[in-house]
Every structure is written in structure tokens, then in C-alpha cells.
Image: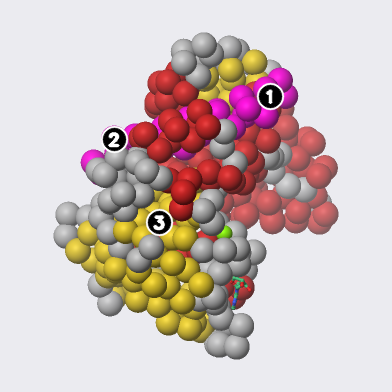
Amino acid sequence: MLIRELRLLNFRNYRTLDLTLDPSVNILVGNNAQGKTNILEAIYLLAMGRSFRAARDSDMIAHDQSYSLVSGQVTTEATHTLELVLRRDGPKRFRFNKKDLPHRQFVGVFNVVLFTPDDLYLVKGSPGERRRFLDWEISQVSAGYRSLLLDYYKVLQHRNSLMKTIAFENQDPKMLEIWDQQLIELGSRLMAIRATMIHKLGLLSRLMHRQISDGKEELTLRYVPFFAADHQDTDYDYQSIKRKFSEALVSARSLELRRGYSLVGPHRDDFQFLIDGLDVKTFGSQGQQRTAVLACRLAELEYMKSETGSFPTILLDDVTSELDQQRKHFLLKLLTKKIQTVITTTNISDFEPDLAVDAKVFQVNAGQVQEGR
Ligand SMILES: Nc1ncnc2c1ncn2[C@@H]1O[C@H](COP(=O)(O)OP(=O)(O)O)[C@@H](O)[C@H]1O
Ligand SMILES: [Mg+2]
């Protein structure tokens, strides 16, 4: 899977940009605030349909413009054109080979894995941030999961508004039953997929981690479903999830009705990184946390390859500034020419001599890009 052409119009600090990327290693070099990360953001948009850093879509439109266009030629089995239009006065639009598509179908045509200096959030961040990570990773490789997720949240919303009506207008709680059934049904399917994904990603992460830490430590990922925060249980198939979900819903009933919203369900899930059985979030050193996150990102590459049949494009934003020699060395060693990579850096010598020799190098300067060293 690769991206060959990237075109931008009125995107961030780019008035126009027309970039031909190399199928293997691309390095974007430039000082701070010149527009390097903006290019990664645009590529990421073509994969995910949303930004990894903009709070609002309109933040990405060039300041004095009313819309922006991001388009890319991506090659999967065939070559396709992906386009995304951001507008100040309306929702963003997605096009695949010149035809409009809903967001949920746009995601997954082209896949990326992004490494950023902020990745520590995966370990240190809130459960919500980890859930978002899970949902977006799985969504990239599974259209079924994307639909399920949207359906689940729709049911959750209906159930919440009904619960408010019941709580504040004294309606009959029996009205909830039909929504309960759907919540359990969709939620349990969602959770079974999450459990399987974390299991696979965990095995791959462990292998990666063994190599980075010279086999001295053992990394595991543990799914923590909303109903099992204190348990060691790891057997999460659909039927057992469904049973526990139903039980949890019954126990939560009276509190839910008093509060007027849903307290149980996969919108309360989490997962943990454990090193030698201990939660890295609480007990890990900064170094262990970084290694765990790096192992997990590298595992994502293999995970996507195994789910889709091809490696995603790797986006590396300024990562060498955050990694020590050993981790840096390990990461760069893995970046073979087989996988397309787009790297940003302020200092190309970070990638010399190994990686930079054959790489396509671009100089980024105030929203202008020039090929060459
Ligand atoms: N919506 C926007 N319109 C115009 N310029 C923008 C917009 N958003 C960000 N920028 C500019 O983009 C630059 C930052 O780009 P970025 O890619 O983050 O830099 P870096 O090269 O450090 O990665 C800054 O100069 C900022 O002012
Ligand atoms: Mg940057």
C-alpha cells in the first residue's frame, strides 16, 4: 500500500502543493514551524478522514480561505484517487475516484501508522484516549467494526435520552428493555472484536518488545472490559461477554435511572500495558513506557499487514528527538525499503548514513517544498 501523489490546496500553510512521494523512504527536512507535520497530517487525513491533532476540521483550512482540498493517489491493488474537502460553512466531504463517499467507507482504503513524540499518551493517557486508539486502529482494517461502532453509539444515545425522560418525567422503566437488548447485542459484538484485536496486538507487541529490551522484560497487553476492572479474567468470547454485560446492566439499573444516563458498556472499556505483570502506567519508568509504546506501534504495522495483506504507510513525526540511541537504532533498522515511510526531522544527520542514502529528501520551508538535500 502506498501514496504516490499528494496534492494540497489551501491546507494549513500551503497555498498549493504537489508532491511525488517515493515508494520507500521519504524524509522531510526543515526548521520548526515550516510545515513538515502539516504534510503528515494531510496524508493521515486521507487514511482516517480526520486529523490527529486539529481540534476542529476548520483549523486546517488556510487562514484566509474558505475551503481546502487534500487529494492523493494511493495504490492498493489498483490505483485510486482519494479526496477530502474541508469547508468553513459545512461538513467535510469525502471522494473516492471522484465519487462521494460517507466517512465510514472512506476510512480503510489507504492505511497509515503514525509515530509521534506524543505517543506516550497511549500508556499515560485516559481510558478514553486508549479506546479511541483501539477504535481507530480496528476501523482501519474492518468496515464491519466501523458500522458496529456507529450503531452502538446511536443506540447509546437513544437509550440515554430515554433514560432522562424516565428519570425526570416519571415514565415506565419498561420502555428501556428494547434498547437494553440492542445495547447488549451490539456492545458485546464490539467487545469481542476488541478482545481479539488486543490479543493479536499483544502477541506482536511482545515479540517487538523482546527485541528492543533484549529479552530482559516481558510486555503484555491486557484488555480491561468495563465489567472487569479488578479481575484477571482473559477469556472474552461473545457469549461470556454478553452474559456479563447483562448482569452488569441489571446491577446498574437503579443507579442509572437516578443518574439518567448509561453507566455500563464498552464506552467504559480500557486496556493496559504490563511489563512483567505490572501496569506500566503506574509502575513503569519513563524509559519502559517509551519502549512499551514503541513496541505497540511497531506491532500495529504487523497487525495491519496480517489483517489487510499489505503494510500501511509509516508516518514518523520528529520521533528521533524523543528516542535514546538504542530505541532509535532499533526503529531505523526496521525501516526497510519494503515499507513506505514518510519522516519529518529538523536534522537529517539523525538518519545518516543508513537510511538517508537512498531516501528521497525534501526541504520544507515556509509552506514551500523542494526536492533535494
Ligand atoms: N490554518 C492554517 N493556516 C495557515 N497556516 C497555518 C495554519 N495552521 C498552521 N499553520 C502554520 O503552519 C506552521 C506549522 O506547521 P507544522 O507542520 O506544524 O510545522 P513543523 O515543520 O514544525 O512540523 C506554522 O507556521 C503555522 O502558523
Ligand atoms: Mg512538526
Q: Nearer the viewer, mark 1 or mark 3?
A: 3
**CA gap, disc 3 to disc 2?**
27 Å
User: Which type of secondary structure does the marked residue at label 2 adopt?
Assistant: helix
Q: Nearer the viewer, residue 110 or 20?
A: 20
Q: Which residues are magenta?
A: 282-310
Residue sitting at x 56%, y 87%: 65
Badge 1, how many Cα within 10 Å: few under 14, some, many 20+? few
Give 188 or 318, whichever is nearer the viewer: 318
Real-space Cα distance between discs 2 and 1?
31 Å
Q: Position of residue 259 (x, y in %)?
A: 81, 44
Which residue is identified by label 1?
285
Q: Main secondary structure of the magenta part?
A: helix
From the image, which quarter does the C terminus lie in?
A: bottom left
First in residue order: circle 2 vs circle 1: 1
Residue 298 appears in the rendering: yes
**Disc 1 C-beta below 8 A from ligand 2:** no
Tell me the kind of residue under disc 1.
Ser
Lateral position of residue 175 relative to residue 151, left or right: right
Which three-letter amino acid code belongs to the residue tagged 2?
Answer: Ser
Q: Which residue is mark 2?
A: 306
Separation of marks 1 and 3 at Cα, in angstroms: 31 Å
Q: Secondary structure at mark 3?
A: strand
Say which of marks 2 and 1 sits in front. Answer: 1
Evaluate whether residue 184 shows in this view. no
Mark 2 neighbour density, 10 Å: few (under 14) some (14–19) many (20 or more): few
